[in-house]
Image: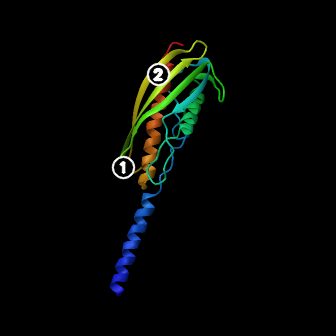
């Protein structure tokens, strides 16, 4: 009887440790997705509005995801920090409109190091004549190491943020290479 009680207590203790280490999934952080610099010093004298799509809210019982609002905020902050455009306008049209839509976000379900792949469609439109200045699919990847965090869901979220940050950086570099 006592032996069975100790076995059950041990099993419950192991289960508790697994639950604590597994944790709950949290959404990608907009600040962690922000690209603070790009390989260009170009400064465009135009205002920009940003629209996003294809994102999903994070289900705490599943895995980290990127919401449309957080992606938009990360892109806007990245544009502001890199000073690529004169200003970012919210709630109204700028001289250019950037639409970014997540087409694919591939995440592993388990492992020590997590590699996340992201594919997003980037479209830049000049509002005055509705001409498309850029339409491009940007593919990015990021691998979070096993020592980034002991908690798997945190490592996965950090990898999702890294893939998004790389995608934003590549997208802004593609815009900087344009002759607007």
Please report the residue visible at 49 percent of the width from the left and 38 percent of the height from the top: 55
* SS label for mark 2: helix
Relative to the observer, which residue lies in front, 164 or 93? 93
Quarter in which the C terminus is drawn: top right
Of badges 1 and 2, the one in the foreground is 1
Q: What is the crowding at mark 1: few (fewer than 14 residues within 10 Å), some, or many (at least 20)? A: few
Please report the residue visible at 50 percent of the width from the left and 21 percent of the height from the top: 175
Please report the residue visible at 41 percent of the width from the left and 53 percent of the height from the top: 152
Please provide percent x and percent y for residue 119: 41, 32
Does the image show residue 61?
yes
Answer left or right for 36 relative to 167.
right
Numbered circles on residues, count: 2
Q: Is residue 71 shown above or below 97? A: below
Please provide percent x and percent y for residue 111: 34, 51
Quarter in which the N terminus is drawn: bottom left
Please provide percent x and percent y for residue 57: 51, 44
Q: Which residue is mark 1?
A: 109
Task: State the mark number for residue 163.
Answer: none
Q: Which residue is mark 2?
A: 174
* SS label for mark 1: loop
Tell me where residue 45 sits by quadrant. top right
Query: CA–CA distance between discs 1 and 2?
Result: 31 Å
């Amino acid at each position: 009887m006592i032996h069975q009680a100790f076995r059950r207590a041990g099993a419950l203790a192991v289960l508790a440790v697994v639950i604590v280490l597994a944790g709950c999934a949290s959404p990608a952080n907009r600040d962690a997705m922000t690209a603070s610099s790009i390989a260009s010093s170009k400064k465009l004298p135009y205002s920009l509005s940003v629209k996003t799509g294809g994102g999903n809210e994070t289900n705490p019982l599943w895995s980290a995801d990127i919401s449309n609002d957080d992606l938009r905020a990360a892109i806007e902050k990245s544009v502001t920090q890199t000073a690529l455009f004169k200003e970012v306008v919210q709630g109204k049209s700028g001289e250019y409109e950037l639409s970014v839509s997540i087409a694919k976000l591939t995440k592993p379900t388990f492992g020590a190091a997590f590699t996340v792949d992201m594919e997003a469609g980037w479209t830049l439109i000049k509002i005055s004549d509705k001409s498309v200045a850029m339409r491009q699919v940007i593919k990015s990847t990021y691998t979070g190491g096993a020592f980034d965090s002991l908690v798997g869901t945190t490592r996965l979220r950090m990898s999702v943020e890294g893939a998004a940050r790389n995608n934003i950086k590549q997208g802004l570099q593609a815009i900087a290479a344009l002759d607007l």
